[in-house]
Image: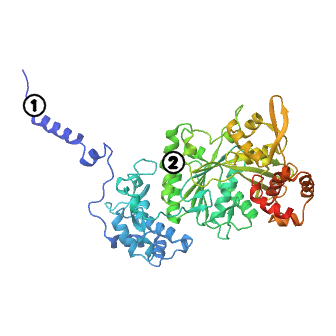
Amino acid sequence: MSRGRSKDQDLIDELAAWIHTPDAETTQTNGHARATAPTSAPRDEEIIQRCRSAENAVKFADLFDHGDTSGNGTDHSAADFALLGILKFYTQDPDQLERLMRMSALARPKWDEGRVGRSWLRYSIENALKGSFETFDWGSKGGRPLLSSSPDPIGESSDDDNNEDDLEVVFFADLGEPKEREYLIEKIGVKGYPIVAFGAGGVAKSFAMLAAGVAIASASGVDRWLGLRVLEHGYVLYLDFELDLDEQHRRVRDLCAGMGVPIPRKLAYLSGVGVSPKAAFAKARAFVEGHEAKAVIIDSMGLAMAGDMERAKDVLAFHSRLVNPLRRAGATPFIVDHEGKLQAGERRKDKSPIGSAYKAWAARNVLQFLLEEYDKENSSLDIRVRQQKTNFTPIEPFGVRFTFEEKKVSMETIELVDANLVEEDTVPLKKRIVAALQSEPATNPERQEITGADAGSIRNKLSELRHEGIVGDDGYKGRNKLYCLLSSSSPSTKESSDDDNKPATVADLFSNPPDWLVKQLVVYHEDPARHLKPLCSAVAAVVLEDVTRALEVQEDVERELAR
């Protein structure tokens, strides 16, 4: 005999169904409910009154009533973010925040300037609302803090900078004359594009990048870094994942002593040690936006990534989620990185940043730091800096000497000896062949091994050098012909690089001929037709600092010979 359902059971079933039915908000967020806003938003006057009665009421009054930026280093942008930090505790409505900000004494015309498709003020408000922060609970009688977070925190692929509404398709023909490329540091530091400095341990790459920060942040007019002109100055953040504040503070002190400048007030430090990279980069981004920082120095990428450096996916995610937001905020990233251990048969110049090739491909300028010489007695390092990749202006390798003294680190550019340049692809092949022959005659296969160039290219350049009278035959080595420099008695570029003694013109050189020129003239007069070109090559090596430019000085040399 079956029994019917009781009314009580029907009521229980209905109640259970109601309990297990998700609300609309939860359904729309894939089962993860968001904090709901209060039913009635607070009025502007209520928020201001709350600010005036809070613990930080004095700070609020300084900013809101008086527009006093002294508590923020007289930095207007930092003061803006400080006031936003107070106001966003009570409201997260961007429109209301904009109204309140414009009621303050901090209001200024800059807020109406365009920034990424919106006003500067609205852009600042949207950035201030990112990440997690406490908010005031207007639904509670006494008010209590709640934890709020942006739905799109940094590190997620859906941050607001990737919002479809910000994308715009344009036609080149409608843009008019293109803007000139802007540089932070001449030749290598294109504004907004990552610069990577990498090398083995002990090559002072971190010192060099920190020195770049000192130069950019300095108000004392530091106009050069590694011999390159610094074209803009402003705030710089050193984001450190390797050492600590005390060590970096000592390094800044020592570098500033070597550069002859006080510690810049616009050079800031942030430690990423012991915190998640996402949190560290979010803080760095807030600094860039709050101070309109020119650069962020990341030391080093290996420790900042917190991923697999061998995987292209992880490397690209690092740049997309952490580095690119700094670029969009207006900063140029300077990234310190390491290189892999040298394996048998490898040349140091062929090494790249350790891990995926995308570590270099994602940057626009890659500088390799190579140890040339360590002088223990004088505590100095000679480093060759070579541009391994660029999308903009190529530069030839150059030398830098770091000298370490008590509480002082000095840097100076030095000239690399020709022998150090023979394997550099950025140096013209003719110059590399001449450099390879300065020590001793060599065969074609030997020059291939030294320069890394192919046999056909070397044969073509040798033909040009022989025609110009710079290179000649010197017998055989086995079955291979030997070649030598005909102007080997001329001084090397390094020996004649003293700007105070180097003659400015051919006439200056001949008016006070050095010993080598006197000897060369004797050889010339024995057979002028044969020895004119070698003489011109020797003169070009001194006056133009380039032995391959003999034809440029030949007319002047002939004029001097006719006197």
Drawn side of residue 127 relative to residue 488, left or right = left
Q: Which mark is residue 319?
A: 2
Residue shown at 89%/53% (left/top)? 524
Residue shown at 84%/31% (left/top)? 477
Q: Is residue 27 visible?
A: yes
Q: Is residue 371 visible?
A: no
Pinpoint residue 491: horizontal percent, then vertical percent: 86, 53
Disc 2 and disc 1 in contact, CB within 8 angstroms: no
- Residue type at mark 2 is His
Residue 453 figure quarter: top right
Mark 2 Cα shell of 10 Å, populated few (<14), some (14-19), many (≥20): some
Question: Could you say which is closer to the camera, residue 271 or residue 281?
Answer: 281
Pinpoint residue 136: horizontal percent, then vertical percent: 38, 61
Pinpoint residue 130: horizontal percent, then vertical percent: 42, 56
Pinpoint residue 349: horizontal percent, then vertical percent: 69, 42
Residue 429 figure quarter: top right
Q: Earlier in the sequence, mark 2 or mark 1?
A: 1
Q: Which residue is mark 1?
A: 5
* Quadrant in which the N terminus appears: top left
* Quadrant in which the C terminus appears: bottom right
Residue 459 figure quarter: top right
